[in-house]
Amino acid sequence: MNTATNPALAAMLGDIACGAIRVIDLTNILSSDFPVIVLPSEFGQCEPFRMETVSRYDGNGPAWYWNNISMNEHTGTHFDAPAHWITGRDIPNGTVDAIPAEDFIHPAVVIDIADEAAADDDFIVTRGFLEEWEKQNGAIPARHWVLLRSNWSKRVGTLSYLNLKDDGAHSPGPDADAMRFLVHERDCIGLGVETVGTDAGQASLFDEPLPAHSILHGNGRFGLQCLTNLDQLPVFGSVIVATPLKIKGGSGSPLRVIAMAPSKD
C-alpha cells in the first residue's frame, strides 16, 4: 500500500506540508570546532570530527565534490546504545546495528530545568524534583524519551559548553534515584540532554557514579547527547526520530535528530 492510499500516512504528510505538524531539527552542526567530552588523561580520548576534501570540481574529480571524514562514535549530537556501557554489554541487540528500527521513533516529554541550570551549573535532577514536576505537569508517560531542557546548547561555541574547571566538568544531570524512577517506574525509552553527556559533569564523584549511563544502558535504554532547540518543543506531544548509523557492533553514532510537533497556532 503506498502513502497515497494509506490514510494515516497521507494525513501526516499533508499536516507536514501545510505546517500543522512542525519539523524541528534537534541537531548541532558537526564540525571540527564542536567540542567532545574530555576524560581523565589516563583513559583513551574521544576523537573530534575531522573532514578532508577528496575533490571539489577539480583535478581530483572534475564533476564531483566529496570528503573523507573521521570521528568517534560519540562525537557531536549522538546516540548511545546499551553496549556503550559495561552494564549494557550483555543486553541483547545492544549495538546500533541490532536495535530494532521501530525503537528509533518514540514520543517525548520535555522537562525544563533551564532556570535551575542557569542558577547552578551543577544542578542535579532528583526523584523529588521529578515528582514535583509531575504534580505541576502530569505523569511522565511510558515509552517516551525524557528530554532535559537546560538551555546548555546556547553555550555552544564558548568554553562554558564543556565548562571544564580544575576539578573536571561542571554541567547538570540526574542522580541515581532519578534514573531508577525514570527507567523502572516511568519506563522511559531513554534520556536526551543538551550537554555533552547524559550524566552530570561531576557524576563520576557520586556515591553511585555515572548513574545515567549505568542505569540506562544496563536496562537496555538509550541516550541522546548534544541536542539543541529543545526550547521549541512542547512539554508533551512531540515525536522524536533518532536513527543512528548502522555501524556493525557500534556502541553509538553521530546522527541527525528531528522532532515532529504540533503547530503553535
Image (cartoon, rainbow, N blue to C red):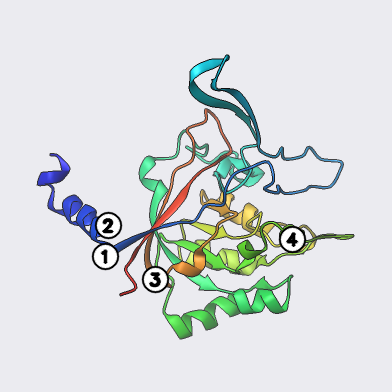
Give the labeled residue for mark 2: 16
Residue 29, image x, y percentages: 57, 48
Q: Amino acid at mark 4?
A: Gly
Q: Secondary structure at mark 1?
A: loop
Q: Given the image, on which type of amino acid does mark 3 rest?
A: Phe
Q: CA distance from mark 1 to mark 4?
A: 38 Å
Foreground mark, 4 or 2, reads 2
Which one is in front in this view, the residue at disc 1 or the one at disc 4?
Answer: 1
- Residue 223 is left or right of residue 257, and the answer is right
Q: For the residues labelled 2 and 3, say whether their Cβ atoms are less than 8 Å apart.
A: no
Q: Residue furthest left?
A: 5
| Dot 1 or dot 4, earlier in sequence | 1
Would you call the spot at circle 4 few (<14 residues within 10 Å), some (14-19), or many (20 or more)?
Answer: many
The disc labelled 1 sits on which kind of residue? Ala
Which residue lies most toward the right here?
Answer: 166
Cβ–Cβ under 8 Å for marks 1 and 3? no
Dot 4 falls on a residue whose secondary structure is: loop
Residue 258 % position (x, y): 43, 53
CA separation in Å, label 4 and label 3:
27 Å
What residue did someone put label 3 on? 236
Residue to which mark 4 is pinned: 201
Q: Which amino acid is tagged 2?
A: Ile
Instruction: Give the Cα separation between the discs numbered 1 and 2.
Output: 6 Å
